[in-house]
Amino acid sequence: MTYEELLEFASNKFEREIFPLLLNNQLMQKNTGFNSHSFPKRFDRLELQKESIETKIDLLHKYMNNRNKSDDFDKVILSELIFILAQATLGYFEIFKSYLEKCLDLPKIMISDNNPTFDLMIKKLSEFKNTDGGLIFHYDGLKKFFNIELRNTLIHDSWWLNENSEFTFEEVDGTVISLNIGELHEELAGINAIVLAFAKNYVKSFDSVNYENMKYNYPHLFR
């Protein structure tokens, strides 16, 4: 799938399976300042990084379309591509973490810390019970959808390149995971989509009067 198709797929999943449950169970609160003043500048930087990523991926595709092997592709460009993919993915993860901190009703999910970890917020969401006493989320599902293992790897800078120049890290249970460029690109699209879908749906739900104005002023936040 193209990057745009990956964005659409992940956005639809978030809008269909995650956001309505947050909204209907009143797990969010209104915070018109949920977008930090630095976010537009950070989004601009992320867009530039994605342009660089697309340029390098195009070069790789053209090289392989000429019946060359990826192993023979310029190692420096290949390494730079993985480095930028990792940095951009972490950038979107950190924006999403900030959104959760500012928009979730933290006391309602039994969090007293004003600066909770990403893991804790996801874990507490999975433990929340509705008025009928039932869980609305399953931890394993949230953990996989939000890819907590990858986010922790990026934030702790605990990954390396394996012998095949793949992004590699070790999960908590000791499982070693290797992602090629295509798979890492999919991970970037996934968290990119979640950030866009959250911002759009949150503003529509809590500040609908200003939605069109915000969409105009911050196109990268409300694509």
Image: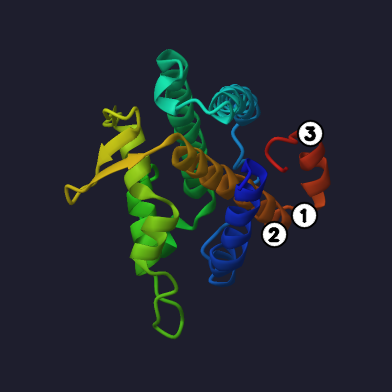
Foreground: disc 1 or disc 3: 3
The residue wearing badge 3 is 217
Mark 1: few/some/many CA within 10 Å (<14, 14-19, 20+):
some
Give the numbered dot on residue 208: 1
Q: Position of residue 145 (x, y in %)?
A: 44, 56
Left/right placement of residue 74 relative to residue 150 reads: right
> Pointer 2: residues within 10 angstroms few (<14), some, or many (20+)?
few
Residue type, numbered disc 3: Asn
Determine which quarter of the picture holds residue 168.
top left
Residue 184 visible: yes
- Counting from the top left corner in percent of width and height, residue 209 is at 81, 52
Please name the residue shown 49% across and 39% down the image: 182
Say which residue label 2 marks: 205
Residue at the left extreme, as displayed = 174
Measured along the vertical axis of the image, is residue 33 above or below residue 103? above
Quarter of the view holding residue 59 = top right
Which mark is drawn over residue 36?
none
Counting other residues with Cα less than 10 Å from the Cα at mark 3, is it few (<14), some (14-19), or many (20 or more)?
Answer: few
Distance Cα–Cα, label 1 vs label 3: 15 Å
Decide: marks 2, 3 in contact (CB < 8 A)? no
Q: CA distance from mark 2 to mark 3?
A: 18 Å
In the rendered image of this protein, does residue 128 appear above or below residue 2?
Answer: below
Q: Position of residue 62 (x, y in %)?
A: 60, 26
Q: Nearer the viewer, residue 32 or 73?
A: 73
Asked if the residues shown at circle 2 and circle 1 are in contact, with their CB atoms under 8 angstroms apart, the answer is: yes
Image x and y of residue 152, in percent = 32, 40
